[in-house]
Amino acid sequence: MNISDQAKGILITVCAVLIISPDSLIIRLLDMNHWTLLFWRGLFVSTGMTVSLTIFYRQDTLQQFHKIGKSGLILIALFTSSTLFFVLALTYTSVANTLVIIATAPIFAAILSRVILRESITMFTALTILIVLAAITMIVSDSYQSGTLLGDTYAMGTAICIAGGFVTTRRSKHINMIPAIALSSALTAFIALLAADSISIKSAEFNLLVVLGLILTLGMGLLIISPRYISAPQVSLLMPLETVFGTLLVWVIVGEPLSLATAGGGSIIILFLTLHSYHSIRYA
């Protein structure tokens, strides 16, 4: 059975997002210093990616790293920044706030695609941008009062970097960018090693980190492949799935509460991004 690039890209992205969804929950369960967490997270993902590349490419593995070029270096910078911002966001604000704000990545992807790739922005996309920005203002206003504004700012930085990463991958879709993610994770681990007071962990924490490394290796690998088949805004428009499942997992298992502003603003964001995703695919 022949599957269109559109359907293939959507299927790959949905699988990737669902696999990555427990990321926030595991980080909450670990409850360790963010630099220690970043070191082990980066180390396991880098190792997992490199092992996977070695299995697939064998003696040509080093050549795959060499082929990433300047676009790969840009992607390394963007994904390293997004990882740092993501963990820092979870340190200073709630999982719900973090994931809801990261769900705005499609907006930044649309803007960057317009500027860098010269892809047009429809009237419906422009309207969605305005509505989502209004919803973010609702969440951030509440965060200012509750003292979590710093965490929300880190989450916004994560969204911008993720969007930039998708656009970069889309622009260089003929290049295998998985080696760039492996190098980005290694760089994250190195930065965290320099900043951490200690990297020692308990055996139970080690087991959770192994699970985290496995799901991120598989999920991020699929996510970085998906822009080969669909546009960067379409990829990021499926990211709100992580917001829904990630927030629900933390609420059910950890019992982390949702503020009214986050629940309301998040519902608005997810609703309009879902409508935008349907509209984009329906009338592509």
Image (cartoon, rainbow, N blue to C red):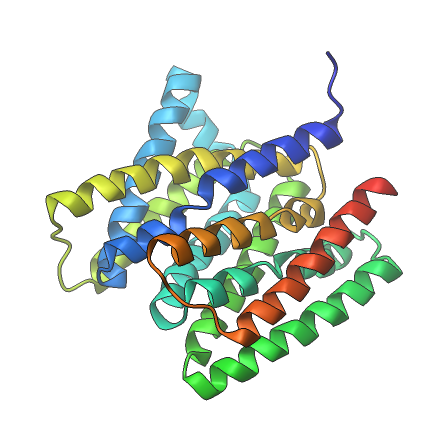
Q: Give above or below for 95 relative to 39.
A: below
Instruction: Please state if 110 lies on the left or on the right of 21 as rendered.
Output: right
Q: Position of residue 231 (x, y in %)?
A: 72, 43
Q: Give above or below for 93 relative to 116.
A: below
Instruction: Please state if 196 lies on the left or on the right of 176 as rendered.
Output: left
Marks counted in the figure total 0
Look at 80% across and 41% down and name the residue there.
Answer: 281
Given residues 103 and 179, the one toward you in this image is 103
Residue 174 visible in this rendered orientation of the protein: no
Q: Give above or below for 248 relative to 186.
A: below
Q: Position of residue 255 (x, y in %)?
A: 36, 61
Given residues 110 and 57, the one toward you in this image is 110
Given residues 259 and 151, the one toward you in this image is 259
Q: Residue 63, located in which quarter of the rendered image?
A: top left
Q: Residue 151, located in which quarter of the rendered image?
A: bottom left
Instruction: Please state if 18 lies on the left or on the right of 118 as rendered.
Output: left
Residue 151 visible in this rendered orientation of the protein: yes
Look at 70% across and 58% down and name the residue there.
Answer: 271
Given residues 284 and 264, the one toward you in this image is 264
Instruction: Please state if 167 lies on the left or on the right of 55 as rendered.
Output: right
Q: Position of residue 143 (x, y in %)?
A: 48, 80
Look at 57% across and 50% down and name the residue there.
Answer: 165
Q: Quadrant of the C terminus?
A: top right
Q: Farthest residue toward the bottom? A: 145
Q: Quadrant of the N terminus?
A: top right
Q: Farthest residue toward the top? A: 1
